[in-house]
Amino acid sequence: MRRPSRGVVTEFDEDRGLGTVRDEVGRDLPFHCTAIADGTRSIAPGTKVTFLTAPGHLGRTEARGLLAAPAADPTAGPPGPGTDDPAPPPAGSVGVPQAPVATPPPDGTAPGGPPASPPETTTVYRPPPAAGAH
């Protein structure tokens, strides 16, 4: 599997939906707004992005699957070893610890508490029918 490239959006024409991203090597790669992976169809020049490259129209290499790179945390220290590693797998994946889920007991009691009280009922007063009305 190819690793994503990194770059910066150098220009983007909102009306035409066409833009250019400059990769780390200095190549300018065109892209169409449909290549923006978050579905917004718009991206500001100067935005740092990750993307894949693929053959495009007329055999040119194009940028595809553009994602804005997360902003660096100014309070974080210098990057340490392993910061170039991919993101951790999502919760629910094999090997990822899960928090236990509390399941209520079948008798209706709250976990660790007294038994639940029955729901309140409401009595509606209806006066007897008037004399002579049938």
Image (cartoon, rainbow, N blue to C red):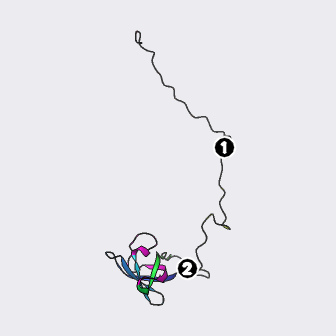
**Mark 2 vs mark 1, CA separation in Å:** 46 Å
Question: Farthest residue in the left direction?
Answer: 15
The span picked out in magenta is: 33-57
Q: Is residue 108 above or below residue 47?
A: above
Q: What residue sits 52% from the left and 29% below the top?
A: 122
Question: Residue at label 2?
Answer: 77
Q: Amino acid at mark 2?
A: Gly
Q: Amino acid at mark 1?
A: Gly
The N terminus appears in which quarter of the rendering? Answer: bottom right
Q: Is residue 132 above or below residue 17?
A: above
Q: What residue sits 39% from the left and 71% below the top?
A: 41
Question: Residue at label 1?
Answer: 113
The residue closer to the viewer here, 117 or 49, is: 49
| Mark 2 touches mark 1? (CB < 8 Å) | no
Badge 1: residue crowd in 10 Å (few <14, some 14–19, many ≥20) = few
Question: Farthest residue in the front direction?
Answer: 58
Q: Position of residue 5 (x, y in %)?
A: 51, 83
